[in-house]
Amino acid sequence: MAISVSIDLSKSPELVSCFHLLVLKGVILTTAAGITVRRLLCDQIGIEPDYLENGIQTILLDGKAVDNLDETVVHDGAVLALSAAMPGLAGAVLRTKGILRGLRREISMDNPALNHEAGPANVTVKLFNRVLQDLGARLLCRGVTVTGKDLLNRLTGCRQELRDGGAVLLLEGQPADFEIIKSCLCTEQSVRLQIVTSG
């Protein structure tokens, strides 16, 4: 069972960037298996349709490029990566609905609606470049699951900034200092993390 850690950054909301490396590495969202990529991004994460259409240029599901967001479905254990425009020919080829997508037939989703399993699904979401800057805070404020090791690395690396910024750490809903949280987290333990950026 995951332990719950909340970090209240309402006094210094800009410090949410201290936790962007978690999202770059990948955080887990729990959703329903079989929902479409569009529903996951818009309904679960809250991405506006205009941003999805114009801000996110590359979408990879399990390493394969996604062109049809309304037919491609997620499954338990899926890895979903989102990126803004990437440079060069590789970026142009991987671009969702790009004119060069025919060059990547080997790494494109070719039978997206095959999986219709029921039940919960843990989906690892990774954000890159501009998308990380734009959506990282939103994802962390929604609540994600990370490993104890990764969270401790971030808390240790940003400890002074968090202290100076008036961050409040909560363990299972109760105020806790860094040492208490450190003593309660196991390396591979699942941690339900939520960042609060407004009072």
Image: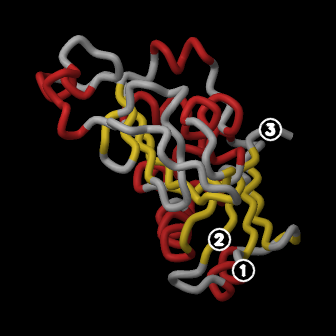
- Residue 141 is situated, as x and y percent measured from the top left of the image, at 70, 45
Task: Place residue 146 in its image quadrant.
Answer: bottom right
Residue type, mark 1 in image: Met
- Residue 22 is situated, as x and y percent measured from the top left of the image, at 48, 56
Q: Quadrant of the N terminus?
A: bottom right
Q: Residue at x 63, y 47 (%)?
A: 140
Residue type, mark 3 in image: Ser
Label 1 to label 2: alpha-carbon separation: 9 Å
Q: Residue at x 52, y 49 (%)?
A: 115
Q: Alpha-carbon neighbours of circle 3 within 10 Å: few (<14), some, or many (≥20)?
A: few
Secondary-structure class at tag 2 = strand
Q: Residue at x 87, y 67 (%)?
A: 173
Secondary-structure class at tag 1 = loop
- Residue 51 is situated, as x and y percent measured from the top left of the image, at 54, 17
Placement of 52 over or under 117, stated as above or below: above
Of 45 and 179, nearer the camera is 45
Placement of 48 over or under 26, stated as above or below: above
Of 45 and 122, nearer the camera is 122
Label 1 to label 3: alpha-carbon separation: 28 Å
Q: Quadrant of the C terminus?
A: top right
Placement of 196 over or under 109, stated as above or below: below
Colour scheme employed for the rendering of this structure: secondary structure
Frontmost of labels 1 and 3 is: 1
- Which residue is labeled 1 in the image? 1
Secondary-structure class at tag 3 = loop
Image check: 120 left or right of 175?
Answer: left
Sequence-wise, the earlier of marks 1 and 2 is 1
Q: Alpha-carbon neighbours of circle 1 within 10 Å: few (<14), some, or many (≥20)?
A: few
Say the numbered circle drawn on residue 198: 3
Say the numbered circle drawn on residue 191: 2
Sequence-wise, the earlier of marks 3 and 2 is 2
